[in-house]
Image (tube, rainbow, N blue to C red):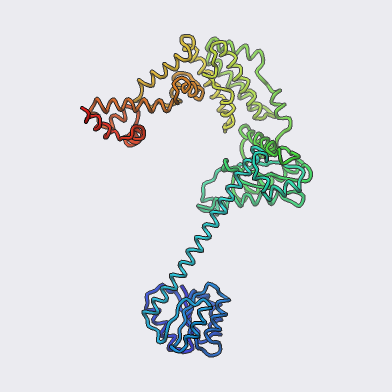
Amino acid sequence: MKLLVVDDEQLMRQGIMKKIQMSGLPITSIFEAGDGEEALRVLHEVKPDIVITDIRMPLMDGLTFLKEAAQAMPELQFIVISGYGEFDYARKAIQFGVTDYLLKPVDKEELKESLMRVMDKIRQRLEQSEAGQQIKHLQNSAEESIRERMLSKLIQYGPGGVPQAERDEQLLALRRNCSYFVAVVFVLKAVKLPHLSFRQGDEKLLSFAVQNMISTVLESTERKGVLFRHAMLENELVYVLGGHSPVETDTLHLELKEILGGIQRHLKLETTIGCGGAVNQMEIIQQSYQQAKQALRNCILHGNGRIYMIDAGEQVKAGLHSVISREDEALLLRFLSECNVSALTGWIDERVELIATGKQVYFAHLESFCVEFHLLLRKYLLTQTSIPEWIIGELDDLLTWLHGLTQWQDIQGHLSEMVRNIVGHLYKLRHSSEYSVIDEVKLFIDSSLHEPINLQTIADRFYFHPSYFSRRFKERFGESFVNYLTAARLRKSEQFLRDSNLKIQEIAELVGFKDAAYFSSVFRKSTGMTPVQFRAAVSSKF
Protein backbone atom coordinates (compact mmCIF):
# COMPACT_ATOMS: atom_id res chain seq x y z
CA MET A 1 0.00 0.00 0.00
CA LYS A 2 1.08 3.60 -0.63
CA LEU A 3 0.90 6.31 2.03
CA LEU A 4 1.16 10.15 2.01
CA VAL A 5 2.18 12.14 5.12
CA VAL A 6 1.13 15.85 5.11
CA ASP A 7 2.52 18.21 7.78
CA ASP A 8 4.09 21.65 7.61
CA GLU A 9 6.68 20.71 10.29
CA GLN A 10 9.49 18.74 8.63
CA LEU A 11 10.67 17.10 11.87
CA MET A 12 7.09 15.95 12.59
CA ARG A 13 6.76 14.48 9.05
CA GLN A 14 10.06 12.64 9.25
CA GLY A 15 9.25 11.34 12.71
CA ILE A 16 5.91 9.92 11.53
CA MET A 17 7.53 8.39 8.42
CA LYS A 18 10.25 6.78 10.59
CA LYS A 19 7.67 5.25 12.93
CA ILE A 20 5.74 3.86 9.95
CA GLN A 21 8.90 2.31 8.48
CA MET A 22 9.69 0.66 11.84
CA SER A 23 6.14 -0.66 12.29
CA GLY A 24 6.65 -3.67 10.03
CA LEU A 25 3.38 -2.98 8.21
CA PRO A 26 3.15 -3.75 4.45
CA ILE A 27 3.54 -0.15 3.29
CA THR A 28 5.36 -0.21 -0.05
CA SER A 29 5.89 3.56 -0.55
CA ILE A 30 5.74 6.64 1.71
CA PHE A 31 5.44 10.13 0.19
CA GLU A 32 5.43 13.54 1.92
CA ALA A 33 4.05 17.06 1.49
CA GLY A 34 4.47 20.27 3.50
CA ASP A 35 1.01 21.81 2.97
CA GLY A 36 -2.39 21.16 1.46
CA GLU A 37 -1.64 22.56 -2.00
CA GLU A 38 1.50 20.46 -2.39
CA ALA A 39 -0.38 17.45 -1.02
CA LEU A 40 -3.06 17.76 -3.74
CA ARG A 41 -0.38 17.74 -6.43
CA VAL A 42 1.32 14.68 -4.96
CA LEU A 43 -2.06 13.03 -4.50
CA HIS A 44 -2.83 13.09 -8.23
CA GLU A 45 0.67 11.93 -9.13
CA VAL A 46 1.13 8.92 -6.82
CA LYS A 47 -2.51 8.04 -5.94
CA PRO A 48 -1.90 6.81 -2.36
CA ASP A 49 -4.21 4.50 -0.41
CA ILE A 50 -3.86 6.32 2.94
CA VAL A 51 -3.21 9.96 3.88
CA ILE A 52 -2.00 11.10 7.30
CA THR A 53 -2.52 14.85 7.59
CA ASP A 54 -2.18 17.63 10.13
CA ILE A 55 -5.22 19.89 10.67
CA ARG A 56 -3.44 23.27 11.03
CA MET A 57 -1.20 24.16 8.05
CA PRO A 58 -0.39 27.34 6.07
CA LEU A 59 -1.61 28.09 2.51
CA MET A 60 -4.27 25.36 2.54
CA ASP A 61 -5.26 23.96 5.90
CA GLY A 62 -6.07 20.33 6.59
CA LEU A 63 -9.86 20.73 6.38
CA THR A 64 -9.78 22.31 2.92
CA PHE A 65 -7.31 19.68 1.76
CA LEU A 66 -9.52 16.90 3.15
CA LYS A 67 -12.59 18.24 1.36
CA GLU A 68 -10.89 18.52 -2.04
CA ALA A 69 -8.99 15.24 -1.69
CA ALA A 70 -12.19 13.34 -0.76
CA GLN A 71 -13.95 14.76 -3.81
CA ALA A 72 -11.05 13.80 -6.09
CA MET A 73 -10.56 10.30 -4.64
CA PRO A 74 -13.71 9.11 -2.78
CA GLU A 75 -12.13 5.82 -1.66
CA LEU A 76 -9.06 7.46 -0.10
CA GLN A 77 -8.61 6.75 3.65
CA PHE A 78 -7.57 9.59 6.04
CA ILE A 79 -5.93 9.71 9.47
CA VAL A 80 -6.01 13.20 11.05
CA ILE A 81 -3.40 14.52 13.49
CA SER A 82 -4.18 17.48 15.76
CA GLY A 83 -3.36 19.07 19.13
CA TYR A 84 -5.56 19.04 22.24
CA GLY A 85 -7.18 22.38 21.44
CA GLU A 86 -8.18 21.47 17.88
CA PHE A 87 -10.97 19.01 18.55
CA ASP A 88 -13.56 21.16 16.73
CA TYR A 89 -11.42 20.92 13.62
CA ALA A 90 -11.18 17.18 14.03
CA ARG A 91 -14.95 16.90 14.43
CA LYS A 92 -15.46 18.72 11.13
CA ALA A 93 -12.88 16.47 9.51
CA ILE A 94 -15.03 13.44 10.32
CA GLN A 95 -17.64 14.83 7.90
CA PHE A 96 -15.14 14.26 5.07
CA GLY A 97 -14.80 10.55 5.79
CA VAL A 98 -11.81 10.59 8.16
CA THR A 99 -11.19 7.04 9.38
CA ASP A 100 -9.11 7.75 12.48
CA TYR A 101 -7.89 10.62 14.70
CA LEU A 102 -4.55 10.91 16.55
CA LEU A 103 -3.27 13.49 19.05
CA LYS A 104 0.14 15.11 19.00
CA PRO A 105 2.73 13.96 19.82
CA VAL A 106 1.99 10.79 17.83
CA ASP A 107 2.64 7.60 19.78
CA LYS A 108 4.20 4.88 17.57
CA GLU A 109 1.94 2.08 18.94
CA GLU A 110 -1.21 4.18 18.49
CA LEU A 111 -0.05 5.06 14.97
CA LYS A 112 0.51 1.39 14.16
CA GLU A 113 -2.91 0.38 15.54
CA SER A 114 -4.58 3.21 13.59
CA LEU A 115 -2.87 2.17 10.37
CA MET A 116 -3.87 -1.46 10.94
CA ARG A 117 -7.51 -0.42 11.35
CA VAL A 118 -7.39 1.65 8.16
CA MET A 119 -5.66 -1.12 6.19
CA ASP A 120 -8.23 -3.65 7.40
CA LYS A 121 -10.99 -1.35 6.19
CA ILE A 122 -9.32 -1.10 2.76
CA ARG A 123 -8.99 -4.89 2.57
CA GLN A 124 -12.68 -5.34 3.43
CA ARG A 125 -13.65 -2.85 0.73
CA LEU A 126 -11.51 -4.61 -1.85
CA GLU A 127 -12.91 -8.01 -0.88
CA GLN A 128 -16.45 -6.72 -1.11
CA SER A 129 -15.71 -5.11 -4.45
CA GLU A 130 -14.14 -8.33 -5.75
CA ALA A 131 -17.05 -10.38 -4.43
CA GLY A 132 -19.45 -7.94 -6.05
CA GLN A 133 -17.63 -8.30 -9.37
CA GLN A 134 -17.74 -12.10 -9.03
CA ILE A 135 -21.46 -12.03 -8.25
CA LYS A 136 -22.05 -9.73 -11.22
CA HIS A 137 -19.99 -12.03 -13.44
CA LEU A 138 -21.95 -15.07 -12.22
CA GLN A 139 -25.24 -13.26 -12.80
CA ASN A 140 -24.16 -12.32 -16.33
CA SER A 141 -23.03 -15.89 -17.01
CA ALA A 142 -26.30 -17.26 -15.69
CA GLU A 143 -28.32 -14.82 -17.82
CA GLU A 144 -26.23 -15.72 -20.88
CA SER A 145 -26.74 -19.43 -20.21
CA ILE A 146 -30.51 -18.97 -19.80
CA ARG A 147 -30.66 -17.01 -23.06
CA GLU A 148 -28.65 -19.65 -24.90
CA ARG A 149 -31.08 -22.33 -23.71
CA MET A 150 -34.04 -20.19 -24.79
CA LEU A 151 -32.58 -19.55 -28.25
CA SER A 152 -31.65 -23.23 -28.64
CA LYS A 153 -35.25 -24.20 -27.94
CA LEU A 154 -36.40 -21.54 -30.38
CA ILE A 155 -34.51 -23.02 -33.33
CA GLN A 156 -35.50 -26.54 -32.28
CA TYR A 157 -39.23 -25.98 -31.71
CA GLY A 158 -40.10 -22.47 -32.88
CA PRO A 159 -41.36 -19.50 -30.80
CA GLY A 160 -44.63 -21.25 -29.86
CA GLY A 161 -42.81 -23.56 -27.46
CA VAL A 162 -40.63 -20.78 -26.00
CA PRO A 163 -42.67 -17.99 -24.32
CA GLN A 164 -39.48 -16.09 -23.31
CA ALA A 165 -38.73 -15.46 -26.98
CA GLU A 166 -41.57 -12.94 -27.04
CA ARG A 167 -39.64 -10.75 -24.57
CA ASP A 168 -36.13 -10.95 -26.02
CA GLU A 169 -35.13 -7.52 -27.34
CA GLN A 170 -32.88 -8.75 -30.17
CA LEU A 171 -35.50 -11.21 -31.43
CA LEU A 172 -38.23 -8.59 -31.23
CA ALA A 173 -36.12 -6.16 -33.28
CA LEU A 174 -35.34 -8.89 -35.80
CA ARG A 175 -38.98 -9.86 -36.18
CA ARG A 176 -40.11 -6.22 -36.35
CA ASN A 177 -37.59 -5.11 -38.99
CA CYS A 178 -37.18 -8.22 -41.16
CA SER A 179 -39.39 -10.19 -43.54
CA TYR A 180 -37.14 -13.19 -44.24
CA PHE A 181 -35.06 -15.34 -41.92
CA VAL A 182 -32.29 -17.89 -42.47
CA ALA A 183 -30.53 -20.19 -39.99
CA VAL A 184 -26.79 -20.69 -40.47
CA VAL A 185 -24.96 -23.28 -38.35
CA PHE A 186 -21.22 -23.13 -37.66
CA VAL A 187 -19.60 -26.28 -36.28
CA LEU A 188 -16.11 -25.67 -34.88
CA LYS A 189 -13.69 -28.53 -34.42
CA ALA A 190 -12.75 -28.78 -30.74
CA VAL A 191 -9.36 -27.25 -29.98
CA LYS A 192 -7.24 -27.75 -26.89
CA LEU A 193 -5.85 -24.64 -25.23
CA PRO A 194 -3.24 -23.18 -25.26
CA HIS A 195 -3.73 -22.41 -28.97
CA LEU A 196 -1.91 -19.60 -30.77
CA SER A 197 -2.10 -16.61 -28.38
CA PHE A 198 -5.05 -18.08 -26.47
CA ARG A 199 -4.03 -19.50 -23.11
CA GLN A 200 -5.66 -22.01 -20.79
CA GLY A 201 -8.98 -20.54 -19.63
CA ASP A 202 -9.41 -18.32 -22.72
CA GLU A 203 -12.29 -20.39 -24.13
CA LYS A 204 -14.71 -17.47 -24.00
CA LEU A 205 -12.18 -15.12 -25.57
CA LEU A 206 -11.66 -17.54 -28.45
CA SER A 207 -15.42 -17.94 -28.88
CA PHE A 208 -15.82 -14.15 -28.91
CA ALA A 209 -13.19 -13.85 -31.66
CA VAL A 210 -15.10 -16.37 -33.82
CA GLN A 211 -18.46 -14.70 -33.18
CA ASN A 212 -17.00 -11.29 -33.96
CA MET A 213 -15.79 -12.52 -37.38
CA ILE A 214 -19.23 -13.96 -38.16
CA SER A 215 -21.17 -10.85 -37.14
CA THR A 216 -18.79 -8.45 -38.91
CA VAL A 217 -19.29 -10.17 -42.27
CA LEU A 218 -22.99 -11.06 -42.11
CA GLU A 219 -24.48 -7.95 -40.54
CA SER A 220 -25.06 -4.81 -42.62
CA THR A 221 -27.43 -1.88 -42.82
CA GLU A 222 -29.89 -4.08 -44.70
CA ARG A 223 -29.58 -7.16 -42.50
CA LYS A 224 -29.56 -8.00 -38.81
CA GLY A 225 -28.88 -11.18 -36.91
CA VAL A 226 -28.82 -13.03 -33.61
CA LEU A 227 -25.78 -15.20 -32.91
CA PHE A 228 -25.56 -17.68 -30.04
CA ARG A 229 -23.94 -20.91 -28.89
CA HIS A 230 -26.22 -23.95 -28.93
CA ALA A 231 -26.91 -24.88 -25.30
CA MET A 232 -26.72 -28.65 -25.90
CA LEU A 233 -24.06 -28.78 -28.65
CA GLU A 234 -20.89 -27.19 -27.30
CA ASN A 235 -19.08 -26.65 -30.62
CA GLU A 236 -22.10 -25.35 -32.54
CA LEU A 237 -22.85 -21.67 -33.14
CA VAL A 238 -26.18 -20.67 -34.68
CA TYR A 239 -26.78 -17.42 -36.56
CA VAL A 240 -30.38 -16.38 -37.28
CA LEU A 241 -30.06 -13.91 -40.15
CA GLY A 242 -32.88 -11.52 -40.98
CA GLY A 243 -33.43 -9.22 -43.93
CA HIS A 244 -36.02 -7.30 -45.95
CA SER A 245 -35.75 -9.77 -48.84
CA PRO A 246 -34.34 -13.28 -49.27
CA VAL A 247 -30.56 -13.08 -49.55
CA GLU A 248 -29.14 -14.34 -52.82
CA THR A 249 -27.65 -17.82 -52.39
CA ASP A 250 -24.47 -16.90 -54.29
CA THR A 251 -23.99 -13.75 -52.21
CA LEU A 252 -24.47 -15.59 -48.95
CA HIS A 253 -22.12 -18.37 -50.07
CA LEU A 254 -19.39 -15.80 -50.80
CA GLU A 255 -19.85 -14.22 -47.37
CA LEU A 256 -19.72 -17.59 -45.63
CA LYS A 257 -16.59 -18.44 -47.63
CA GLU A 258 -15.01 -15.22 -46.34
CA ILE A 259 -15.87 -16.21 -42.76
CA LEU A 260 -14.55 -19.74 -43.26
CA GLY A 261 -11.28 -18.42 -44.65
CA GLY A 262 -10.92 -15.81 -41.90
CA ILE A 263 -11.43 -18.31 -39.08
CA GLN A 264 -8.93 -20.69 -40.66
CA ARG A 265 -6.39 -17.99 -41.49
CA HIS A 266 -6.44 -15.97 -38.26
CA LEU A 267 -7.53 -18.52 -35.66
CA LYS A 268 -6.39 -21.81 -37.28
CA LEU A 269 -9.74 -23.44 -36.46
CA GLU A 270 -11.45 -25.97 -38.71
CA THR A 271 -15.06 -24.88 -39.22
CA THR A 272 -17.88 -26.49 -41.17
CA ILE A 273 -20.90 -24.39 -42.14
CA GLY A 274 -24.45 -25.47 -42.93
CA CYS A 275 -27.04 -23.05 -44.29
CA GLY A 276 -30.81 -23.57 -44.43
CA GLY A 277 -33.32 -22.00 -46.75
CA ALA A 278 -35.13 -18.70 -46.18
CA VAL A 279 -38.48 -18.67 -44.33
CA ASN A 280 -40.87 -15.72 -44.22
CA GLN A 281 -41.87 -16.05 -40.55
CA MET A 282 -39.85 -16.25 -37.36
CA GLU A 283 -42.43 -18.78 -36.15
CA ILE A 284 -41.03 -21.38 -38.56
CA ILE A 285 -37.31 -20.60 -38.20
CA GLN A 286 -36.80 -24.18 -36.95
CA GLN A 287 -37.45 -25.37 -40.52
CA SER A 288 -34.43 -23.42 -41.76
CA TYR A 289 -32.35 -24.72 -38.85
CA GLN A 290 -33.26 -28.35 -39.59
CA GLN A 291 -32.35 -27.78 -43.24
CA ALA A 292 -28.97 -26.37 -42.18
CA LYS A 293 -28.37 -29.44 -40.01
CA GLN A 294 -29.41 -31.69 -42.90
CA ALA A 295 -26.97 -29.89 -45.21
CA LEU A 296 -24.20 -30.33 -42.63
CA ARG A 297 -24.61 -34.10 -42.68
CA ASN A 298 -23.14 -34.09 -46.18
CA CYS A 299 -19.74 -33.57 -44.53
CA ILE A 300 -19.83 -37.33 -43.83
CA LEU A 301 -19.39 -37.81 -47.59
CA HIS A 302 -17.36 -34.77 -48.60
CA GLY A 303 -15.41 -33.83 -45.47
CA ASN A 304 -15.27 -31.00 -42.92
CA GLY A 305 -14.03 -27.44 -43.40
CA ARG A 306 -16.55 -26.70 -46.17
CA ILE A 307 -19.83 -24.83 -46.72
CA TYR A 308 -22.98 -26.86 -47.28
CA MET A 309 -26.01 -24.99 -48.62
CA ILE A 310 -29.37 -26.76 -48.53
CA ASP A 311 -30.56 -27.92 -51.94
CA ALA A 312 -34.33 -27.52 -52.29
CA GLY A 313 -34.51 -30.72 -54.35
CA GLU A 314 -32.24 -32.79 -52.12
CA GLN A 315 -34.95 -35.02 -50.64
CA VAL A 316 -36.60 -35.53 -54.03
CA LYS A 317 -33.29 -36.41 -55.64
CA ALA A 318 -32.50 -38.79 -52.78
CA GLY A 319 -35.86 -40.50 -53.20
CA LEU A 320 -35.25 -41.07 -56.91
CA HIS A 321 -31.66 -42.20 -56.47
CA SER A 322 -30.61 -45.86 -56.82
CA VAL A 323 -33.10 -47.49 -54.44
CA ILE A 324 -33.09 -51.26 -54.02
CA SER A 325 -34.53 -52.68 -57.24
CA ARG A 326 -36.76 -55.73 -57.55
CA GLU A 327 -33.78 -57.70 -58.85
CA ASP A 328 -31.74 -56.61 -55.82
CA GLU A 329 -34.58 -57.58 -53.51
CA ALA A 330 -34.92 -61.06 -55.01
CA LEU A 331 -31.17 -61.60 -54.78
CA LEU A 332 -30.98 -60.44 -51.14
CA LEU A 333 -33.96 -62.56 -50.06
CA ARG A 334 -32.27 -65.62 -51.62
CA PHE A 335 -29.00 -64.86 -49.80
CA LEU A 336 -30.93 -64.52 -46.52
CA SER A 337 -32.76 -67.81 -47.04
CA GLU A 338 -29.43 -69.50 -47.74
CA CYS A 339 -27.82 -67.77 -44.74
CA ASN A 340 -25.06 -66.66 -47.10
CA VAL A 341 -23.31 -64.07 -44.94
CA SER A 342 -20.34 -63.47 -47.24
CA ALA A 343 -22.57 -62.78 -50.25
CA LEU A 344 -24.74 -60.41 -48.23
CA THR A 345 -21.85 -58.44 -46.72
CA GLY A 346 -20.12 -58.27 -50.10
CA TRP A 347 -23.26 -56.82 -51.70
CA ILE A 348 -23.60 -54.28 -48.86
CA ASP A 349 -19.97 -53.11 -49.14
CA GLU A 350 -20.21 -52.70 -52.91
CA ARG A 351 -23.56 -50.88 -52.91
CA VAL A 352 -22.71 -48.47 -50.06
CA GLU A 353 -19.40 -47.50 -51.67
CA LEU A 354 -21.08 -47.05 -55.04
CA ILE A 355 -23.59 -44.57 -53.55
CA ALA A 356 -21.12 -42.76 -51.30
CA THR A 357 -18.54 -42.11 -54.01
CA GLY A 358 -20.98 -41.19 -56.76
CA LYS A 359 -21.25 -37.75 -58.32
CA GLN A 360 -23.79 -35.19 -57.09
CA VAL A 361 -24.55 -37.37 -54.08
CA TYR A 362 -26.09 -36.26 -50.78
CA PHE A 363 -26.04 -37.99 -47.43
CA ALA A 364 -29.81 -38.32 -47.84
CA HIS A 365 -29.09 -40.84 -50.61
CA LEU A 366 -27.27 -43.10 -48.18
CA GLU A 367 -29.94 -42.57 -45.55
CA SER A 368 -32.69 -43.58 -48.00
CA PHE A 369 -30.72 -46.68 -48.93
CA CYS A 370 -30.29 -47.68 -45.27
CA VAL A 371 -34.01 -47.22 -44.61
CA GLU A 372 -34.97 -49.38 -47.60
CA PHE A 373 -32.46 -52.05 -46.61
CA HIS A 374 -33.87 -52.12 -43.07
CA LEU A 375 -37.43 -52.46 -44.42
CA LEU A 376 -36.31 -55.32 -46.67
CA LEU A 377 -34.76 -57.16 -43.72
CA ARG A 378 -37.90 -56.58 -41.69
CA LYS A 379 -40.05 -57.89 -44.54
CA TYR A 380 -37.99 -61.09 -44.62
CA LEU A 381 -37.97 -61.53 -40.83
CA LEU A 382 -41.77 -61.25 -40.69
CA THR A 383 -41.84 -64.57 -42.54
CA GLN A 384 -39.72 -66.08 -39.77
CA THR A 385 -40.89 -64.36 -36.57
CA SER A 386 -43.57 -61.98 -35.38
CA ILE A 387 -41.00 -59.70 -33.76
CA PRO A 388 -38.33 -58.71 -36.32
CA GLU A 389 -37.30 -55.74 -34.16
CA TRP A 390 -35.91 -58.29 -31.73
CA ILE A 391 -33.04 -58.91 -34.14
CA ILE A 392 -32.54 -55.71 -36.17
CA GLY A 393 -34.10 -53.10 -33.88
CA GLU A 394 -36.66 -50.52 -34.89
CA LEU A 395 -36.27 -48.08 -37.76
CA ASP A 396 -35.87 -45.23 -35.26
CA ASP A 397 -32.85 -47.02 -33.81
CA LEU A 398 -31.22 -47.00 -37.24
CA LEU A 399 -32.07 -43.33 -37.89
CA THR A 400 -30.68 -42.35 -34.48
CA TRP A 401 -27.47 -44.22 -35.25
CA LEU A 402 -27.19 -42.53 -38.66
CA HIS A 403 -27.65 -39.14 -37.00
CA GLY A 404 -24.48 -39.69 -34.96
CA LEU A 405 -22.41 -41.01 -37.86
CA THR A 406 -19.01 -39.41 -38.53
CA GLN A 407 -17.82 -41.42 -41.57
CA TRP A 408 -19.82 -43.21 -44.25
CA GLN A 409 -17.63 -46.34 -44.12
CA ASP A 410 -19.21 -47.25 -40.75
CA ILE A 411 -22.49 -47.94 -42.57
CA GLN A 412 -21.01 -51.00 -44.21
CA GLY A 413 -20.08 -52.55 -40.88
CA HIS A 414 -23.38 -51.64 -39.24
CA LEU A 415 -25.57 -53.16 -41.96
CA SER A 416 -23.32 -56.25 -42.15
CA GLU A 417 -23.70 -56.71 -38.39
CA MET A 418 -27.48 -56.66 -38.81
CA VAL A 419 -27.20 -59.41 -41.43
CA ARG A 420 -24.95 -61.53 -39.20
CA ASN A 421 -27.45 -61.12 -36.36
CA ILE A 422 -30.23 -62.42 -38.61
CA VAL A 423 -28.28 -65.45 -39.81
CA GLY A 424 -27.03 -66.31 -36.32
CA HIS A 425 -30.47 -65.91 -34.81
CA LEU A 426 -32.42 -67.86 -37.43
CA TYR A 427 -31.29 -71.15 -35.95
CA LYS A 428 -32.56 -70.18 -32.51
CA LEU A 429 -35.87 -68.86 -33.85
CA ARG A 430 -36.56 -72.18 -35.58
CA HIS A 431 -36.23 -74.11 -32.34
CA SER A 432 -37.66 -71.81 -29.66
CA SER A 433 -40.04 -68.93 -29.04
CA GLU A 434 -38.85 -65.41 -28.25
CA TYR A 435 -39.74 -65.78 -24.59
CA SER A 436 -37.78 -69.02 -24.23
CA VAL A 437 -34.78 -67.25 -25.76
CA ILE A 438 -35.03 -64.62 -23.01
CA ASP A 439 -35.19 -67.41 -20.47
CA GLU A 440 -32.05 -68.83 -22.03
CA VAL A 441 -30.37 -65.46 -21.57
CA LYS A 442 -31.45 -65.39 -17.94
CA LEU A 443 -29.93 -68.85 -17.35
CA PHE A 444 -26.70 -67.68 -18.98
CA ILE A 445 -26.57 -64.61 -16.70
CA ASP A 446 -27.17 -66.67 -13.57
CA SER A 447 -24.38 -69.09 -14.48
CA SER A 448 -21.88 -66.47 -15.65
CA LEU A 449 -21.93 -63.84 -12.91
CA HIS A 450 -18.13 -63.98 -12.63
CA GLU A 451 -17.76 -62.86 -16.27
CA PRO A 452 -17.72 -59.21 -17.46
CA ILE A 453 -21.31 -59.30 -18.76
CA ASN A 454 -22.96 -56.25 -20.29
CA LEU A 455 -25.78 -55.52 -22.72
CA GLN A 456 -23.51 -55.62 -25.77
CA THR A 457 -21.89 -58.96 -24.86
CA ILE A 458 -25.36 -60.52 -24.41
CA ALA A 459 -26.52 -59.06 -27.74
CA ASP A 460 -23.43 -60.40 -29.52
CA ARG A 461 -23.74 -63.88 -27.99
CA PHE A 462 -27.44 -64.32 -28.69
CA TYR A 463 -27.71 -62.23 -31.90
CA PHE A 464 -30.03 -59.62 -30.42
CA HIS A 465 -30.40 -55.94 -31.18
CA PRO A 466 -29.25 -54.33 -27.87
CA SER A 467 -31.95 -51.68 -27.44
CA TYR A 468 -34.84 -53.95 -28.40
CA PHE A 469 -33.53 -56.78 -26.20
CA SER A 470 -33.34 -54.37 -23.26
CA ARG A 471 -37.00 -53.41 -23.68
CA ARG A 472 -38.15 -57.04 -24.06
CA PHE A 473 -36.14 -58.18 -21.04
CA LYS A 474 -37.86 -55.57 -18.87
CA GLU A 475 -41.29 -56.65 -20.17
CA ARG A 476 -40.50 -60.27 -19.35
CA PHE A 477 -38.99 -59.86 -15.87
CA GLY A 478 -40.31 -56.48 -14.69
CA GLU A 479 -36.89 -54.88 -14.27
CA SER A 480 -34.10 -53.69 -16.51
CA PHE A 481 -31.28 -55.97 -17.60
CA VAL A 482 -28.73 -53.90 -15.62
CA ASN A 483 -30.82 -53.99 -12.41
CA TYR A 484 -31.41 -57.73 -12.78
CA LEU A 485 -27.69 -58.40 -13.30
CA THR A 486 -26.73 -56.31 -10.24
CA ALA A 487 -29.40 -57.98 -8.08
CA ALA A 488 -28.30 -61.47 -9.21
CA ARG A 489 -24.69 -60.68 -8.35
CA LEU A 490 -25.66 -59.40 -4.91
CA ARG A 491 -27.81 -62.47 -4.20
CA LYS A 492 -24.87 -64.69 -5.09
CA SER A 493 -22.53 -62.64 -2.91
CA GLU A 494 -24.89 -63.03 0.07
CA GLN A 495 -24.71 -66.79 -0.41
CA PHE A 496 -20.90 -66.73 -0.37
CA LEU A 497 -20.89 -64.49 2.73
CA ARG A 498 -23.18 -66.92 4.57
CA ASP A 499 -21.68 -70.22 3.48
CA SER A 500 -17.95 -69.60 3.04
CA ASN A 501 -14.91 -68.00 4.62
CA LEU A 502 -13.78 -66.41 1.38
CA LYS A 503 -12.24 -62.94 1.56
CA ILE A 504 -14.32 -59.97 0.42
CA GLN A 505 -12.03 -59.41 -2.59
CA GLU A 506 -12.44 -63.06 -3.63
CA ILE A 507 -16.24 -62.87 -3.34
CA ALA A 508 -16.27 -59.62 -5.31
CA GLU A 509 -14.38 -61.27 -8.18
CA LEU A 510 -16.60 -64.37 -8.11
CA VAL A 511 -19.70 -62.23 -8.65
CA GLY A 512 -18.23 -59.98 -11.34
CA PHE A 513 -16.80 -57.04 -9.34
CA LYS A 514 -13.08 -56.50 -9.93
CA ASP A 515 -12.83 -53.89 -7.17
CA ALA A 516 -13.72 -54.84 -3.57
CA ALA A 517 -14.36 -51.22 -2.58
CA TYR A 518 -16.90 -50.73 -5.37
CA PHE A 519 -18.51 -54.09 -4.51
CA SER A 520 -18.83 -53.01 -0.85
CA SER A 521 -20.37 -49.70 -1.89
CA VAL A 522 -23.01 -51.38 -4.12
CA PHE A 523 -23.69 -54.03 -1.45
CA ARG A 524 -24.19 -51.40 1.26
CA LYS A 525 -26.49 -49.33 -0.93
CA SER A 526 -28.66 -52.41 -1.53
CA THR A 527 -28.68 -54.01 1.95
CA GLY A 528 -27.86 -51.13 4.27
CA MET A 529 -24.78 -53.05 5.52
CA THR A 530 -21.23 -53.59 4.33
CA PRO A 531 -20.30 -57.19 3.39
CA VAL A 532 -18.34 -57.50 6.65
CA GLN A 533 -21.34 -56.30 8.71
CA PHE A 534 -23.65 -58.66 6.79
CA ARG A 535 -21.39 -61.64 7.48
CA ALA A 536 -21.19 -60.73 11.17
CA ALA A 537 -24.97 -60.32 11.42
CA VAL A 538 -25.58 -63.71 9.78
CA SER A 539 -22.97 -65.43 12.01
CA SER A 540 -24.53 -64.03 15.20
CA LYS A 541 -27.80 -65.84 14.45
CA PHE A 542 -26.14 -69.27 14.68
Residue 242: give x, y in percent of width and height.
73, 45
Q: Is residue 311 left or right of residue 36?
A: right
Q: How many marks?
A: 0
Residue 454: give x, y in percent of width and height.
42, 27
Q: Foreground: 535 or 315? A: 535
Image point (44%, 22%), residue name: 458
Decide: is 522 above or below 348: below
Q: Farthest residue toward the left?
A: 542
Residue 515 in view, yes or no? no
Image point (62%, 35%), residue name: 299
Residue 301: give x, y in percent of width and height.
62, 32
Decide: is 230 above or below 116: above
Decide: is 469 above or below 258: above
Residue 387: give x, y in percent of width and height.
54, 16
Q: Foreground: 89 or 7? A: 89
Image point (79%, 43%), residue name: 245
Q: Is residue 221 left or right of residue 525?
A: right
Decide: is 48 above or below 346: below
Q: Is residue 367 left or right of residue 532?
A: right
Q: Foreground: 90 or 329? A: 90
